[in-house]
């Protein structure tokens, strides 16, 4: 790694002398020599500063079989280590991720990435500055591009960052393996790796931004298998398809309770609302914009008197915000990603597989029966819809 400050501190603190700049192995521009042989695996390419850290982060995610450190995003063919370190080739340190799509979706990988990087810094990451350390998403397909852009928009809407989310999203062109010395660096050199990561400020920043949300249940990004159907996967929805009407229009189209809940953060009465005991199969969408929020597949009878779900239709469908409005208690508010409607709260007392209870207001949602979903524009979700859990 070309961490100049790191080297100086490390020499002083650990007596490490004579660190050798190891060259780049140019054996492959796309299929890494370290790639697993399983043909069923998919590949994704991300950059987030020091590839030691990004590789280590991805290899902790269920479903990731291998993560390889290397370089992407530049025009120079077969660049050497010195060229990349100087920033003249346009490459950035990147990681090629080989994953099982039956265990983890591309959106799941993105959620992991957000918890490894600072997506507001386009000039580097933490201790390492320069275009050779810039964060980026290198999409391999149009679907990856769509999912990435939707996830970025949801991240921007979340309000977690003081600055705009601006990392690069660009088409993948090539990937060059870094030398073997850099592969699994966190395993082979734990003392140096931990010393570097602590002093880089990376994880202090992530802890401050994400708090308790830093830990994520990746089971919600696992493929779902429907009865008598092929395996289908939960995907990010297209936010461009849904719009929030003006306040004047909302006052006309919403009931008094719907307006108070979605626009003024009110809570409707328990056991006296439209969907708390709804048992039919279908989809729940934002009553304001129509954006999809929950599936009946994930609905269960919580006994609270409000419609409850174990997870949303997609991680980028909702935004979580800290809520201290209830007698000083700290709760996690749930809002829709696009219309910013108040929908309810999420609690950590739900059933398996997530252990979460998304306690929602019926007034914030519109229910569409499974038989009507295709005509209503939600045909892409039909194969995911089953009867409620309970």
Image: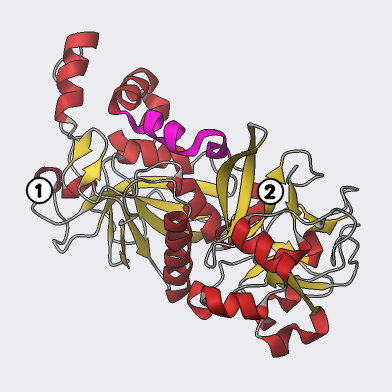
Question: On screen, 67 above or below 157?
Answer: above
Secondary structure that dominates the magenta span: helix
Residue 315, image quadrant: bottom right
Look at the image and say whether residue 207 sits in the magenta stretch. Answer: yes
Left/right of residue 366 with respect to residue 335 in the rendered view: right
Front-lying residue, 187 or 111:
111
Badge 2 density bin: few <14, some 14–19, many ≥20, Cα 10 Å: many
Question: On screen, 368 above or below 4?
Answer: below
Q: Quadrant of the N terminus?
A: top left
Q: Quadrant of the C terminus?
A: bottom right
Identify the residue at horizontal 36%, vertical 60% (top origin): 31
Secondary structure, mark 1, is: helix
Secondary structure, mark 2, is: strand
Identify the residue at horizontal 65%, vertical 85% (top origin): 377
Give the residue number, with chain letter if any, for mark 1. 83
Residue 325, image quadrant: top right
Marks 2 and 1, the one that precedes in the sequence: 1
Front-lying residue, 353 or 141:
353
Position in image of residue 52 (x %, y %): 34, 36
Give the residue number, with chain letter if any, for mark 2. 345
Identify the residue at horizontal 85%, vertical 72% (top origin): 281
Left/right of residue 351 with respect to residue 39 in the rendered view: right
Identify the residue at horizontal 52%, vertical 60% (top origin): 106
Q: CA distance from mark 2 to mark 1?
A: 50 Å
Front-lying residue, 102 or 365:
365
Position in image of residue 85 (x %, y %): 13, 43
Point out the stretch of residues depicted in magenta. Answer: 201-215
């Amino acid at each position: 790694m070309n961490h100049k400050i790191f080297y100086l501190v490390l020499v002083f603190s650990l007596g490490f002398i004579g660190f050798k700049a190891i060259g780049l192995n140019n054996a492959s521009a796309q299929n890494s020599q370290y790639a697993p042989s399983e043909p069923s695996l998919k590949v994704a390419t991300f950059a987030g500063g020091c590839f030691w850290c990004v590789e280590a982060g991805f290899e902790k995610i269920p479903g990731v079989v291998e993560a390889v450190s290397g370089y992407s995003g530049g025009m120079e063919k077969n660049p050497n280590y010195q060229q990349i370190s100087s920033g003249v080739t346009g490459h950035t340190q990147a990681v090629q991720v080989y994953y099982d799509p039956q265990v983890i979706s591309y959106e799941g990988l993105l959620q992991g990435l957000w918890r490894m990087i600072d997506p507001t810094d386009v000039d580097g990451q933490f201790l390492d500055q320069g275009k050779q350390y810039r964060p980026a998403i290198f999409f391999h397909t149009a679907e990856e591009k769509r999912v990435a852009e939707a996830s970025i928009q949801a991240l921007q809407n979340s309000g977690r960052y003081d600055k705009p989310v601006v990392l690069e999203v660009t088409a993948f062109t090539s990937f060059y393996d870094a030398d073997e010395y850099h592969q699994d660096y966190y395993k082979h050199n734990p003392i140096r790796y931990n010393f570097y990561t602590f002093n880089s400020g990376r994880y202090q920043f992530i802890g401050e931004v994400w708090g308790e949300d830093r830990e994520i249940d990746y089971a919600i990004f696992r493929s779902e298998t429907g009865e008598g159907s092929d395996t289908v996967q939960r995907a990010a929805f297209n936010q461009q398809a849904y719009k929030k009407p003006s306040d004047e229009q909302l006052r006309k189209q919403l009931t008094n309770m719907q307006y108070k809940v979605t626009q003024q953060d009110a809570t409707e009465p328990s056991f006296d609302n439209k969907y708390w005991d709804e048992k039919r199969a279908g989809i729940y969408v934002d009553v304001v914009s129509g954006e999809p929020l929950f599936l009946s597949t994930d609905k269960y009878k919580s006994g609270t008197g409000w419609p409850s779900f174990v997870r949303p239709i997609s991680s980028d469908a909702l935004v979580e915000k800290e809520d201290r409005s209830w007698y000083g208690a700290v709760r996690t508010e749930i809002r829709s990603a696009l219309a910013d409607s108040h929908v309810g709260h999420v609690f950590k007392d739900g059933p398996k597989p997530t252990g979460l209870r998304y306690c929602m207001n019926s007034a914030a949602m519109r229910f569409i029966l499974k038989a009507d979903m295709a005509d209503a524009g939600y045909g892409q979700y039909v194969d995911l819809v089953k009867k409620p859990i309970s």
